[in-house]
Amino acid sequence: MIRKSNLFLSLAIITLASCTSTSDKKSEESVDSKETVTLGQEVSYTADSTTMKGYIANDQSIEGKKPGILVIHEWWGHNDYTRNRADMLAELGYVAIAVDMYGDGKQAAHPEDAGKFAGQVFANIEDAKARFEAALTTLKNNPSVDTSKIAAIGYCFGGSVALTMANAGYDLDAVAAFHSGVQLPVQPTGELKTRILVQNGADDPMVSEESVEGFKATMEAANATYEYIAYPGAVHAYTNPEATALGEKFKLPLAYNKEADEKSWEKMKAFLAASFE
């Protein structure tokens, strides 16, 4: 159910953000017998002295101004999985930017490196905000974007970043977080205006019951509009088809759950549509 409240946050979630990567989608494909022209374009932008390497997806066959969506990567870094989700959003009629939060398109091949990179982001919130803001500006500068309609989605680490930026006061209509921690390093200074959707696995050992209860209590205390969904049988990284193999490789509690993946995506679609009404 949707409730009103506020987030109280803590830095401990960084280590919970273990997620995975997948392959790129084709840039041109047919959906429901309608030809789409999804232009996937690599973009570079800067935050202070750091060059960030992102990716913008836009279906050129859909005319007019469109809402813009920031897609924030898991702790592995800006990768094909993030770009794939940006392409999927473009097919829905959005302009999506796959964000680079680490700089130079840096990726991690091992969980130890991933944890280090994610920790560095949250260790300096001002730098993190600058990187997010640079991506936001790049998205808004795209001529196809309706700058009055902006949202962010994120996976694991990326979900934590998206929630943090909403709490930091960025003008976002909506944030959707998938298998994300709900303890973050920034809490709202006033009422949280951004609509929030968090979709986690009910059996995810990386998100404690205590943290979820704390999240709900602080959200309600601050009159934020939110919905928290826990999918039965789903664990961490449930949206990613490669999660099971990586979980086995690194002995981490990761596993793909097709049913939860599909349900959470459909829920997000309805959530975004309602948020942009």
Image (spheres, rainbow, N blue to C red):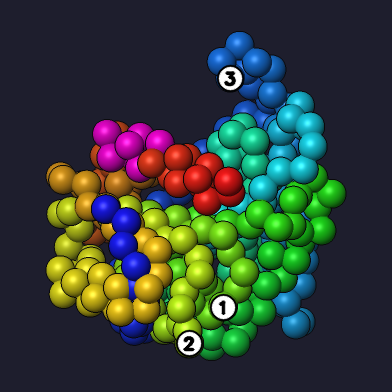
Q: Read off the residue under disc 2.
A: 189
- State the mark number for residue 182: none
How far apart in space, not on screen, are marks 3 and 2 (Cα)?
43 Å
- Asked whether the residues under the numbered discs 2 and 1 touch, taking CB atoms below 8 Å apart as contact, a structural biologist would say yes
Disc tally is: 3
The reply, left or right, for residue 58 in relation to residue 194 is right
How far apart in space, not on screen, are marks 2 and 1 (Cα)?
8 Å
The reply, left or right, for residue 140 in relation to residue 217 is right
- State the mark number for residue 31: 3
Residue 215, compared with residue 36, is above or below; it is: below
Residues rendered magenta in the picture: 259-266
Q: Read off the residue under disc 1.
A: 169
Give the image quarter of residue 116: bottom left
Density class for disc 1 (Cα within 10 Å; few <14, some 14-19, many ≥20) is some
Q: Residue at x 37, y 61 (%)?
A: 226
Q: Amino acid at mark 1?
A: Gly
Q: Amino acid at mark 3?
A: Val
Residue 242 locus on image (x, y percent): 36, 42
Sooner in the amino-acid sequence: mark 3 or mark 2: 3
Q: Nearer the viewer, residue 160 or 110?
A: 160
